[in-house]
Amino acid sequence: MLQITGVSRRFGDVTALADVSLEIRQGEFFALLGPSGCGKTTLLRILAGFESPDAGTVTLDGADLLGRPPHRRPVNLMFQSYALFPHMTVAKNVAYGLEREKLPRAEIRSRVGEVLEKVGLSAMAGRRPQQLSGGQRQRVALARAIVKRPRLLLLDEPLSALDKKVRAEMQLELKRLQHEVGITFVVVTHDQEEAMSLADRIAVFSAGRVEQVDEPVALYQRPRTPFVAGFVGENNLFGGRACSVGLAADGLGVLPGSSDMPDGTSALLAVRPERVRLAPADAVADAPGVLRGEVADVSFYGGVSHVSVTVPGRQEPVLAAVQGATRTLPGERVALSWAPEDGVLVPQ
């Protein structure tokens, strides 16, 4: 549906976007994920028409999008601050765009009622924004954005102003709403959990470039670049050279992993903490790929415990995630291992 080809944008000496190409499908929930300053909001502003690229093309259903002024695009942008009119009621805020299009009053009433029902705010139609909670204001902004039935809805950090519990509720709400209204959503976020829980596919950005585009599970399990391996979720990264059974790691010997890289290729081995097996040091015999070390720290997060282990020959501690509370204590000697298929090799 949306084809972005070779889009670049510079601000003086700063390259905000460098030759970005993406395809976004009809009805998809697509996330642009990356750290602050990586170019994702600049791309959103180009799609909305508030910014012009220095190079590249953007087409919507095969027609040029960049040649149209913002108000003529079938695109709506929901701002991070929600940008609601404080002097208007909820219903008036939602109706504003339709009134500007001079639609018949009966149609405006019908569409506003329908969309307020969808976001669960029918009972609050007569209230003003200052009388609402953060989550409710976010729903008003969403209702105002979807009432015009755009082909594409752009959301810039839509949940960043909400507290953790409300954010979790709104993530479910957003996903439900997107399925109901069938509009293509493109969301910008630096929150990995948000991207993982909401999106059908995610594009990971770094320094104005797209590092990887994939479905959430594939992105988590099979990162294709060192940046993605280090940015998406917790990871243990070991440097070395690819070999037939995994990675020949400097100072640690051969570590198990799976890849189709030629032997001797400079690579990183990525192992997720939940894939690391933790056992008392004397319970595991010496074998290739078994690391031994001392527990440096144990942190309990309710459903999971993180155990940091200092391993000789490695600067960074190795992180293991254990379900529930653990009896492992700082100072204990432990053995660490993982299955070969749980070690992913990434070219350096």
Image (tube, rainbow, N blue to C red):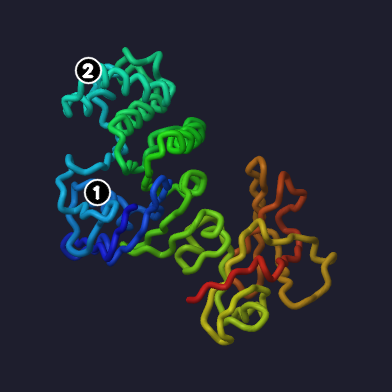
- The quarter of the picture where residue 247 lies is bottom right
- Residue type at the position of mark 1: Arg
Q: Which residue is mark 2?
A: 105
Secondary element at image label 1: helix
Establish if 151 lies above or below 224: above
* Tag nearer the camera, 1 or 2: 2
Question: What amino acid type is highlighted by mark number 2?
Answer: Arg
One can see residue 164 in this view: no
The residue depicted at 37 percent of the width and 30 percent of the height is 138
Residue 240 against residue 72 in the figure, above or below = below
Residue 122 - label:
none
> Is 41 left or right of 323, judged from the image as shown?
left
Q: Which residue is mark 1?
A: 45
Q: Is residue 199 above or below residue 117?
A: below
Counting from the top left corner in percent of width and height, residue 163 is at: 45, 33
Q: Nearer the viewer, residue 90 or 34?
A: 90
**Proximity of marks 1 and 2: CB atoms separated by less than 8 Å:** no
Task: Specify whether residue 263 is in view.
Answer: yes
Residue 72 placement: quadrant:
top left
Q: Residue at x 29, y 17 (%)?
A: 128
Residue 223: where, in percent of width, then height?
52, 65
Does residue 278 appear to the left or right of 221 in the view shown? Answer: right
Q: In the rendered structure, which disc, 1 or 2, sits on the residue that comes first in sequence?
A: 1
SS assignment at label 2: helix
**Where is residue 337 shown, x and y percent of the image?**
72, 67
Q: Position of residue 101 (x, y in %)?
A: 17, 29
